[in-house]
Amino acid sequence: MAHLTTGERDPELNKRLDAELTAFNSAATGADDYGSFSVRATDEAGELIGGLTAWTWGGLCGIEMLWVREESRSGGWGAKLLLAAEAEARARGCDRVAVSSFTFQAPGFYQRHGYRETGRMLGIPGGHSDVHLFKRLDGTPNPETAVDIEV
């Protein structure tokens, strides 16, 4: 008899699902070059100023997280991390990048760096939205809307 089990996050299940979906996605798209990277900024004392994590797959870079400590946010560190990530994405063969940011976080930051909004997920606590953004890295004009995206 089959069973359903609900519980806390299951690292073993997560690893298996990741492997299964990666295999499925690779078979469906022909792209099997999944990778990941990070960018870290530290101060003279070795303390974290900020960082960025991202993945790459099939010419697309997906920014997972970008954070800069509060007292360093006016020092341009977000831009430095983002530009370093875009350079790394290009070095890995990516020609486009995607990111999402809650409305109370930094969608304006990404838009100032050439990202275009392609959609929103509603229902974030506090009446906020999750803004999805996209940027071409190859000099091709960025799309005006999600409908215009060609990959």
Image: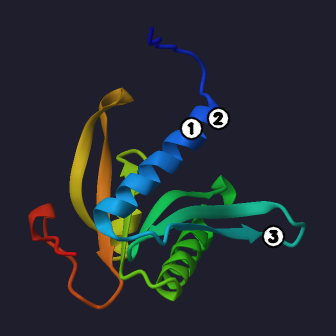
Would you say the residues marked 2 and 1 are in contact, meaning their CB atoms lie under 8 Å apart? yes
Q: Residue at x 50, y 67 (%)?
A: 34
Q: Where's residue 58, x and y in %?
A: 38, 73
Q: Amino acid at mark 1?
A: Asn
Q: Nearer the viewer, residue 44 or 7?
A: 7
Image height check: is 70 above or below 82? above
Residue 43, label in figure:
3
Q: Where's residue 119, x and y in %?
A: 21, 53
Q: Which residue is mark 1?
A: 14
Q: Nearer the viewer, residue 49 or 36?
A: 36
Give the image's coloring scheme. Answer: rainbow
Q: Where's residue 108, x and y in %?
A: 35, 61
Q: Nearer the viewer, residue 29 or 55?
A: 29
Of the image marks 3 and 2, the number of the one nearer the N terminus: 2
Q: In the picture, residue 129 is in which quadrant?
A: top left
Residue 11, label in figure:
2
Of the image marks 3 and 1, the number of the one nearer the N terminus: 1
